[in-house]
Amino acid sequence: MKQIVTLLLLVGTSYGAFEWQQLPAYPRGMGTAFTAISTASDALFWNPAGLSSFNGNVDLLIAYSRPFGGMDVGLNNGLVGFMKKFGDIGFGIGFGDYGAKIEGDYNGRYAEQILTAGAALPLNERLSFGIKFNYYRLSMPRFNPSGAFGVDIGAIAKFYSKWMVGLYVQNASSASLTASDGTSYRLPSSLAFGVALRPYRNTLTSIDIRKEYGQPVTVALGQSVSWNRFTLRGGVQSQGDFLQFDAGFTARFRGFRIDYSATITPEFPVTHTFTIGFGR
């Protein structure tokens, strides 16, 4: 298994790079059906339009996971995010790191790192627009690090008091990485459309449809139910023959929150994702 993962990491400079979105725990627990309900610091890594929907003033999160239990090569994924509102406008900055230890002929660490900054502006009471700027850096043993700049855009609209609709364009600028041999590789680009319904104050259903360039359509469904300071959620997503199940919860106490999600993919170890956040 180690050899297989190592091979995927090394040849992934073309399209595998920056494709795996594992964090934070809240979106994962919803089965990644998060386009229409993005909010707070989580929105910085999914749909930036949600940066303006946060009811508080400041939000901070730290998230970590070991995808598929590390797969014997030390796979790990971590990020930090911070957002602040100035009036109705939300601003955020974040950093994500995904990597693995590679042994043998390519001894060292494979790393995908993203530095991102975004902002969201409510155009009116029902519609908000967001944009974020990303710097991608890919590094691996025996190859020169490669970097690129990209732009993501998103929008969220609210209808009546129960319906939300979201649109998110990943890598709208068609950013590409240049390998050490001069070959250019396009980074993942996708279009996501989401619809969410909150029939009751403590119940939320969300559906996403995503089309990634060169990949089958992904359909994701998430459901959450809340009781006071505790929220329980679950979700499922499918892409071609790929099927994934997610479940998680959030516990809140005096501005702090703990998010957890478990991702179950057939024939692979469970991925546990943790997020600690603070908002006020």
Image (cartoon, rainbow, N blue to C red):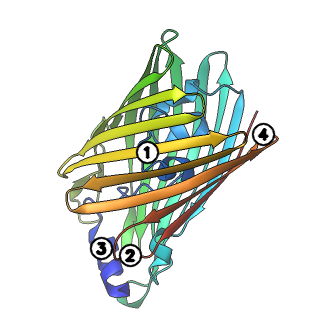
> Label 4, on which residue?
255
> Label 2, on which residue?
268
Considering the numbered disc 1 on the image, is that residue within a helix, a strand or a loop? strand
Give the side of residue 118 with respect to residue 274, left or right: left
Kindly report which numbered mark, 3 or 4, lies closer to the viewer in this rendering: 4
Q: Specify which label sits upstream in the sequence, 1 or 3.
A: 3
Nearest the viewer among 42 and 170 is 42
Kindly report which numbered mark, 1 or 3, lies closer to the viewer in this rendering: 1
Which residue occupies 27% across, 48% down?
Answer: 218
Q: Specify which label sits upstream in the sequence, 1 or 4.
A: 1
Q: Specify which label sits upstream in the sequence, 1 or 2.
A: 1
C-alpha span from label 2 to label 3: 15 Å
* Residue 15 found in image quarter: bottom left
Circles 1 and 3 in contact, beta carbons < 8 Å: no
Label drawn at residue 222: 1
C-alpha span from label 3 to label 4: 41 Å
Check the image and report above or below for 197 versus 247.
above
Is disc 1 surrounded by few (<14), some (14 to 19) or many (20+) residues within 10 Å?
many
Q: Position of residue 134 (x, y in %)?
A: 45, 42
Which residue occupies 56% across, 29% down?
Answer: 51
Q: Specify which label sits upstream in the sequence, 3 or 4.
A: 3
